[in-house]
């Protein structure tokens, strides 16, 4: 028995012209199949968002388009190749570089969804006469019967939920968007793809940043960001080594520091000598990377954060009070209190300590399964 795609007015009896973003992956392919099953007129669009090094071993754009075209052929639908590389560089990549130069760690996938996949792509689809767009994201949309507002919900597969990356979507975007696979678990998506003979049924999921792909991150960033080596210091100011540029490190990072333990001269060797080092702070004025020893060092723990550049799904900030939040994608919801929320920012207090909360990343708020919106983490307090 096939599961229902999505509740609410968007899947009512009238059939729609739906433009699907076909990425070449299995999730968007099954999305197109499910919509065709419902009787909608479905057209595919393949979005090309990066073209600086099309011929490199890390750029999968060419193969992804071939896979998307093969899916369209099997499903009997049209597909169009659209180049959004200029928009991407201007709206997403430029901001990505600015944030890294400022010593923060941005999340470009969040901005890509808001500016490209649900803005440039949506606008293009509307010009093609689409009534709805659809993507292979693991999330859901419903219209609240009391407020008539559209709500962004978590995907039913908790291991694949992507609402965190979609929290900047607004009412106009959600009202025109379908997320068919948000009602499914990934295993069911794979099963459907194999059952109907999709050529990419076993294709590996993409895990790279939207435009960087699987390439070595430091090597990529080196081409665009000026960097100056500087000292790696511990919390007491002792020099432990040399970093290659502050932009290449993120808070909580353990790997790739190139430093060992530190022992006071003449002191007996203790258990702490070999405790791992973690990035705790960046001192931009001194161009110094500050590291601490031990996963639970106080400098890595915090109870409070402030966020800016907020975006709210309902169009207005939630009231102060109990809530839940994620400060990184692969995190369980953490109970918190919204101390103050405005249109452009908010502050949160956590009863339980949070580890390595990172400026530049997104803090996303939830009320149960409903994603309320979020903002960019600006400051963190112990």
Image (tube, grey):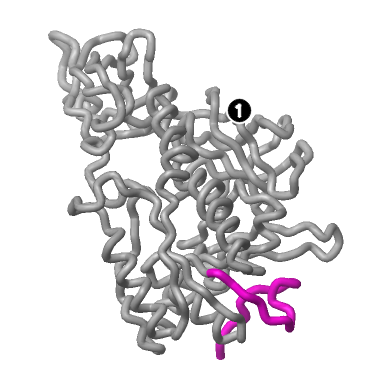
Disc 1 crowd, CA 10 A, few/some/many (<14, 14-19, 20+): many
x, y (%) of residue 86? 43, 44
The local secondary structure at tag 1 comes to: strand
| 66 versus 49 height, above or below | below
Q: Quadrant of residue 96?
A: top left
User: Please, is residue 36 above or below residue 299 in the view?
Assistant: below
Q: Residue furthest left?
A: 266
Highlighted magenta segment, given as a residue range: 1-19
Task: Kindly identify the residue that appears in the image at 62 percent across and 75 percent down.
Answer: 17
Residue at (53, 34) in percent of width and height: 353
Q: Residue 126 versus residue 26: which sits nearer the camera?
A: 126
| Residue 101 picture quarter | top left
Q: On the picture, is 343 further left or further right than 212?
A: right
How many callouts does the rendering have? 1
Tell me which residue sits at (39%, 28%) in the image: 100
| Residue 251 is covered by the magenta coloring | no
Residue 14 located within the stretch drawn in magenta = yes
**Side of 142 relative to 241 (left or right):** right
Q: Nearer the viewer, residue 132 or 99?
A: 132
Q: Closer to the camera, 224 or 17?
A: 17
- Residue 145 left/right relative to 181: right
Q: Would residue 338 appear left or right of 35 to someone viewing this image?
A: right
Give the residue at x 53% y 25%. 380
Q: Position of residue 305 (x, y in %)?
A: 58, 29
Name the quadrant containing residue 191.
Answer: bottom left
Mark 1 sits on what residue?
Answer: 306
Q: Is residue 332 visible?
A: no
What is the chief secondary structure element of the magenta stretch?
Answer: loop
């Amino acid at each position: 028995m096939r599961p229902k795609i999505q509740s609410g007015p968007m899947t009512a009896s009238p059939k729609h012209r739906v433009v699907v973003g076909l990425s070449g992956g299995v999730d968007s392919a099954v999305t197109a199949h499910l919509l065709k099953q419902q009787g909608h007129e479905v057209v595919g669009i393949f979005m090309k968002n990066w073209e600086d090094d099309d011929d490199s071993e890390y750029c999968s754009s060419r193969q992804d388009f071939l896979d998307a075209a093969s899916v369209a052929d099997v499903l009997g639908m049209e597909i169009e190749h659209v180049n959004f590389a200029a928009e991407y560089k201007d709206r997403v990549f430029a901001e990505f570089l600015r944030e890294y130069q400022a010593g923060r760690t941005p999340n470009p996938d969040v901005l890509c969804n808001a500016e490209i996949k649900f803005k440039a792509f949506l606008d293009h689809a509307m010009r093609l006469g689409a009534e709805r767009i659809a993507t292979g994201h693991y999330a859901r949309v419903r219209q609240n019967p009391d407020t008539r507002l559209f709500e962004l919900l978590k995907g039913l597969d908790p291991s694949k939920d992507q609402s965190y990356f979609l929290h900047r979507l607004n009412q106009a975007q959600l009202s025109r968007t379908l997320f068919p696979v948000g009602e499914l678990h990934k295993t069911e998506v794979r099963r459907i793809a194999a059952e109907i003979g999709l050529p990419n049924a076993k294709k590996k999921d993409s895990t790279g940043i939207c435009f960087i792909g699987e390439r070595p991150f430091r090597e990529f960033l080196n081409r665009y960001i000026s960097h100056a080596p500087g000292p790696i210091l511990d919390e007491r100011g002792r020099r432990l080594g040399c970093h290659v540029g502050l932009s290449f490190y993120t808070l909580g990072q353990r790997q790739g520091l190139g430093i060992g333990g530190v022992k006071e001269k003449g002191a007996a060797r203790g258990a702490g000598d070999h405790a791992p080092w973690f990035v705790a702070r960046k001192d931009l004025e001194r161009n110094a990377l500050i590291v601490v020893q031990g996963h639970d060092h106080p400098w890595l723990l915090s109870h409070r954060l402030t966020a800016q550049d907020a975006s709210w799904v309902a169009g207005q900030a939630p009231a102060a009070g109990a809530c839940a939040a994620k400060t990184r994608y692969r995190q369980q919801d953490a109970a918190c209190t919204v101390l103050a929320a405005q249109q452009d920012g908010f502050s949160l207090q956590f009863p339980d300590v949070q580890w390595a909360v990172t400026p530049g990343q997104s803090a996303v708020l939830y009320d149960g399964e409903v994603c309320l919106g979020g903002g960019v983490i600006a400051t963190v307090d112990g």
